Image (cartoon, rainbow, N blue to C red):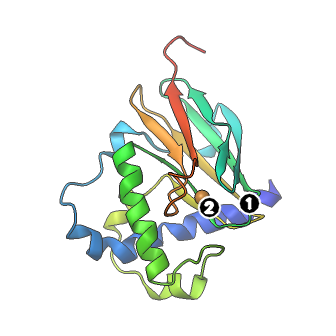
Amino acid sequence: MKAILPGALLALNLFAIPAALAQHEAHQHAAPTATAAIGQPGKAGAASRTIAITLSDMAIDPARIAVHPGETVRFQITNKGQLLHSFVIASQDGHGERQAMMGMMLDHGMVTDTAIVPAMMNMKHDGHEMAHDHTGLVLVEPGKNAELVWTFPQGGVIEAACDMPGHYEAGMVSRLTIDHDGH
Ligand SMILES: [Cu+2]
């Protein structure tokens, strides 16, 4: 588990990022993201299993993920590519919003194509409204690991994807199915 820690800490720090952009986004969409439809962050102790995710340039392995209704899953994510990638659980609309957010983070110098810029992250944050809307997002630098624990809803259409601009279109998306047959 030690190898996971740096990424896990990184993921926690990330909750401050969306707040930095909250003001920008507030003008763009009034309605908050319907978090309930895609689930919510879970507790590691409640996870029924661990799914290893490998990010590369430009794919997510596995390309299909099946979960049970209401299941809590611990995702252990490794970036084996050369580029900065993200692992995001969201609806299709939610991915669009996060792609816009990641584009702004690039524009603001908070991230580059290959790395997170911590100094830029820390100087930009106030408020924390958007943090709730953008849970389910972790950034993973090349060669690093991260962990995301997620509790899935009873149903719905959800995708796991990388929302760095252009990566979704390049194939970094994994179809998540909520299996009602019990396995
Ligand atoms: Cu990516």
Residue at 52% in and 68% down: 14
Image location (x, y in percent) of residue 120: 52, 86
Q: Quadrant of the C terminus?
A: top right
Q: Quadrant of residue 104 in the image?
A: bottom left
Q: Image height check: is 70 above or below 168?
A: above
Q: Which mark is residue 42?
A: none
Dot 1 beta carbon under 8 Å from ligand 1: yes
- Is 107 placed left or right of 2 in the picture? left
Q: Amino acid at mark 2?
A: His
User: What is the crowding at mark 2: few (fewer than 14 residues within 10 Å), some, or many (at least 20)?
Assistant: many
Relative height, residue 51 to residue 93 (above, below): above
Q: CA distance from mark 1 to mark 2?
A: 8 Å
The answer to whether mark 2 is within 8 Å of ligand 1 is yes
Three-letter code for the amino acid on which mark 1 is drawn: Gly
Percent position (x, y) of residue 125? 41, 81
Image quadrant assignment for residue 107:
bottom left
Is residue 169 visible in the rendered structure shown here?
yes
Count all numbered tags in the image, as a single digit: 2
Q: Residues within 10 Å of mark 1 (few under 14, many from 20)?
A: some
Q: Looking at the rendered structure, which numbered label has been put on residue 81?
A: 1
* Picture quarter with ligand 1: bottom right
Residue displayed at 65% across by 30% down: 48
Residue at image mark 2: 85
